[in-house]
Amino acid sequence: MAGSCGPGPGLCRGMSLGGGLRDTLSLSWVVGSNTFLALVIALAAAVAALSKRRPLLAALSLLLMPIAAVALPTLAVIASTYSGCQVNEDGIGDCMLWGAKMGMSFHEAAVASSALYDTVPYSFALALMVGALGFVFFRPKEA
């Protein structure tokens, strides 16, 4: 949309920009749909925050990063759908966006809610545990 091109099957100013979005969405669905991978990445960020003595940042990274890994690609799909493109759980139909076929990268957004249901309980429990341990053992040093 930055190039003043609305969502649709046509090219954007003569360029096929849809392939970049399709590949980016495919990569983001690998992380977002794999609960274990999303939590491992968030846990690595939390450990980095704890090493800098930032327990609140550690807890928030564990809480928000796995949710954002599913929510942001879903919002990207919602923002780029148009009237001729139907996103469904069965993967029926093929949307074309800016000159490229989206394939299953758009249809994955229809089942994103199940990925959230898988991730949120673990994310919340880990964030609560790391936040409590962080405030006990990793408080910022007082000057």
Image (tube, helix red, strand yellow):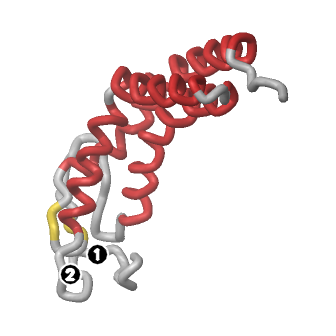
Q: Residue furthest front?
A: 143
Q: Dot 1 lies on which element? A: loop
Q: Dot 2 lies on which element? A: loop
Left or right: 44, with 51 as reference point = left
Whole-percent x, y for residue 12 in the image: 25, 82
Q: Please state which of residues 60 and 44 is positioned toward the viewer in this rendering.
A: 44
Q: Quadrant of residue 138?
A: top right
Q: Quadrant of residue 18?
A: bottom left
Whole-percent x, y for residue 80 in the image: 37, 65
Residue sitting at x 15%, y 63%: 101
Q: Which residue is mark 1?
A: 8
State how many labels appear: 2
Looking at the picture, which amino acid does disc 2 mark? Leu
**Vertically, is 90 above or below 61?**
below
Q: Which residue is mark 2?
A: 11
Q: Please state which of residues 51 and 92 is positioned toward the viewer in this rendering.
A: 51
Instruction: Report the quarter where the N terminus lies.
Output: bottom left
Residue sitting at x 57%, y 30%: 49
Residue sitting at x 59%, y 24%: 50
Whole-percent x, y for residue 100 in the image: 16, 67
